[in-house]
Amino acid sequence: MQDQQSTAKAAIPDVDLMGMIGLLPADEHERFLRVREFLQRRVRPESIGFWNREEFPFELLPELAELGLGELQVDGSSLLFKGLMYFEVARADVSLSALVGIHNELIVGMIDRLGSAAQRERWLPGLRSFRELGAFALTEPDHGSDIAGGLETTAELVDGEWVINGAKRWIGSGTIADFALVWARDVADQRIKGFIVETDRPGYSATKIEHKMGLRIMQNAHIVLDQVRIPEANLLPGASDFAAANELLRDSRAWVGWQAAGIQFGTFDIARDYALERIQFGRPLAKFQLIQLSLSEILGNASASLALMLQFARMQEQGDAQMVQAAMAKATTTRLARESVAKGRALLGGNGVTSDYEMAKLFGDAEILYSYEGTYEINSLIVARAMTGVGAFV
């Protein structure tokens, strides 16, 4: 894509300067490399067109399923491997990493752990193979950060059926999913509960949210639920109270940290290649001191983010991870991602503002990471509250 080419080569091609991927056991390391090769060969180059058109690449789902990315939550993989898969998918494309992460953490995970035997039998086989997709419907048009206390969608048990009314917004895969996990307030006891709502039921409508600045491949939706009737058995028995979902929501918050580490390594990939190939003033950009400074800072941020996530995975394995650690991981890594991608965009100069050179795509995606699964500010307040014992939310 460059108008002038350089023959400069990277002295150390592997950007994992601290050898963190090597912490995987041999079998998972081999699998990791197979997935990486596919993601870099197929997903990364093809994602740009889909991102520009705001389209979803359905044709990639069978291949992602063959690599096991639809069943990371239930296939016995280590938490480290699962996190590094999220990291590596994000390195190739953040939208698809959002799909893989939400699918595993919040759809497969919740049905497997909070669903009934009948619900697991009905949905898990199709989900594991990406033949079916689910959507996690929590956020509402008027309630984001305050959703736990402000949720307005209602569920009422009438003659053996739940009647759902309300609206949801920013719901990933909402227009393409086979069902939505809808969180609604039971009018009888005022408790927030989780329900499986098939998307072909009368009264369910989903409209794609268009013209986003990032995660343009992810099909976010505005959902309206108008007198949607579902069987009584569609209530997730383990989700009869919102607190039951806290552990999975904690892990999904931390999952964004893996994404943030991945997008920074992707940023470094693009920036280093560009710096070696782009000729200005008769020499590669990589020979300029300020360019080398930016590259070093991007890789430093990326490596620090990945190290933070590796420690979080270790705490998960030991059962020590709490919401405060997840909040700190998410807030810190997305702050560093925003900084890294801004440096990468500046390094590409004018070419940094067009998705043809990839960096503009990452620049937009990083902004979304900064705000979803709990905004940077909310996660920072969670950390500070834990450390001071004083809440400052209101």
Image: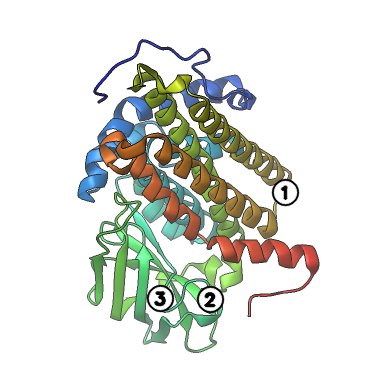
Q: Residue at x 28, y 31 (%)?
A: 45
Q: Nearer the viewer, residue 355 or 143?
A: 355
Mark before the other along the chain sequence, 1 or 3? 3
Q: Which residue is mark 3?
A: 232
Q: Is residue 88 left or right of residue 328?
A: left
Q: Which residue is mark 1?
A: 319
Q: Residue at x 53, y 76 (%)?
A: 146
Give the vertical position of 12 relative to 333 (above or below): above
Disc number for residue 36:
none
Residue lying furthest right: 388
Secondary structure at badge 1 equals loop
Q: Which residue is mark 2?
A: 146
Mark 1 or 3: the one toward you = 1
Q: Position of residue 289 (x, y in %)?
A: 52, 25
Q: Nearer the viewer, residue 157 or 367?
A: 367
Q: Nearer the viewer, residue 136 or 267?
A: 267
Q: For residue 27, which quarter of the picture?
A: top right
* C-alpha span from label 3 to label 2: 28 Å
Q: Amino acid at mark 1?
A: Gly
Q: Amino acid at mark 2?
A: Asp
Dot 2, crowdedness within 10 Å: few (<14), some or many (≥20)?
Answer: some
Q: Amino acid at mark 3?
A: Glu
Q: Position of residue 282 (x, y in %)?
A: 35, 16
Give the vertical position of 297 relative to 328 (above or below): above
